[in-house]
Image: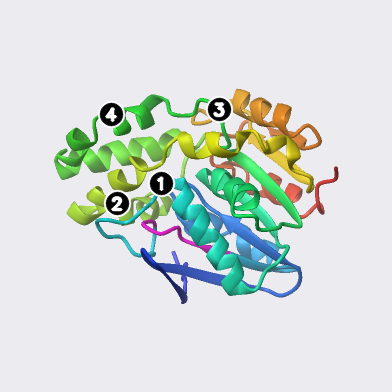
Amino acid sequence: MDWTLDEKFETPEGVVRWGALGSGDPLVLVHGTPYSSFLWRDIAPALARTRRVYFFDHLGFGRSEQREGQDLSLAAHSRNFARLLDHWGLSRPSVVAHDIGGAVALRTLLLEERSYRDLTLFDAVSGGAWERGLFRLFLEHEEVFRELPGYAHEALVAAHLRHATQAGFRPGVLDAFLAPWQGAAGQAAFYRQYTQIRQADTVAYEHLLGDVSIPVRLVWGREDRILPPEYAEWLHARIPHAELHWIEDAGHLLQEDAPGRLLAYLTAGSASV
């Protein structure tokens, strides 16, 4: 499947790969873990019919640089996102964020003090008690997971990816998501990024969520097993003016489970306060 990131941006921790499509008002797409901008392969071209759409792979993900010693915390991802916005010359873009991309977008807005025109968060890490399940085991037993035989590691990652989708992946898609995490280097990179993503980096801005004044839209898969519906309700209670929309029969990956319905929200115009 053809998905290219032709542009490079140098950060203190390594190279971030990015791309852009279309023309018009700017809109930025922010992915989560353990995914990459490949998630946007259907969404970005559709949005680019009327917008200038930017997308990128977080440092340590996808086609961006992976190496030992990188700071891959949510705080570091947020600093890199702020740098990218400055590099692109975007002062008030629309931002659409998924999974840990939600925390990155919120930290960049509230702590890095960058401005957005509006913000859409779907099935996103935002705050509360999200260090749970398999993620908690990664944090507590990093060395065990790093030492897994390659076949066992690949089976675990594949099962984790499948758990995120209600409808299942189309042919070739699972392989594309697996590719950055394969081999010895990929296995090390997978656990390196997961064990640096900590709840403390969302606690840092939770007290500011009520101060968010831009239009905010929340869209959530009703069958999300990674971040179940109560996480949407938690966030909605703290940004009271935000719109909250449910997508039925869809899981954590709306880009895979319900791309048409997701696009309907993303092209419906800005959320309103």
User: What percent of the width, then of the height, locates residue 38?
Assistant: 48, 58
150 part of magenta stretch:
no
Cα–Cα span, label 3 and label 2: 28 Å
Q: Secondary structure at mark 2?
A: helix
Near-viewer residue (170 or 119): 119
Position of 270 with respect to 187 (left or right) is right
Tell me if I can see residue 164 in this picture.
no
Assign the C terminus to one quadrant of the image.
top right
Chain-order first, disc 4 or disc 1: 1
Residue 181: numbered disc: 2
Which three-letter amino acid code belongs to the residue tagged 4? Glu
Tell me if I can see residue 87 in this picture.
yes
Residue 140: numbered disc: 4
Tell me which corner region of the image, top left, top right, bottom left or bottom right, holds residue 194: top left
Cα–Cα span, label 1 and label 2: 9 Å
Q: Secondary structure at mark 3?
A: loop
Residue found 76% across the figure and 72% down from its top:
24
User: What percent of the width, then of the height, locates residue 237?
Assistant: 72, 26
Q: Which residues are magenta?
A: 55-61
Q: Mark 1–mark 2 contact, CB under 8 Å?
A: yes
Residue placed under numbered mark 3 in the picture: 128
Residue found 52% across the figure and 52% down from its top:
31
Residue placed under numbered mark 1 in the picture: 34
Q: Secondary structure at mark 4?
A: helix
Q: Secondary structure at mark 1?
A: loop
* Dot 2 alpha-carbon crowd within 10 angstroms: few under 14, some 14 to 19, many 20 or more: many
* Dot 3 alpha-carbon crowd within 10 angstroms: few under 14, some 14 to 19, many 20 or more: some
Cα–Cα span, label 4 and label 1: 18 Å
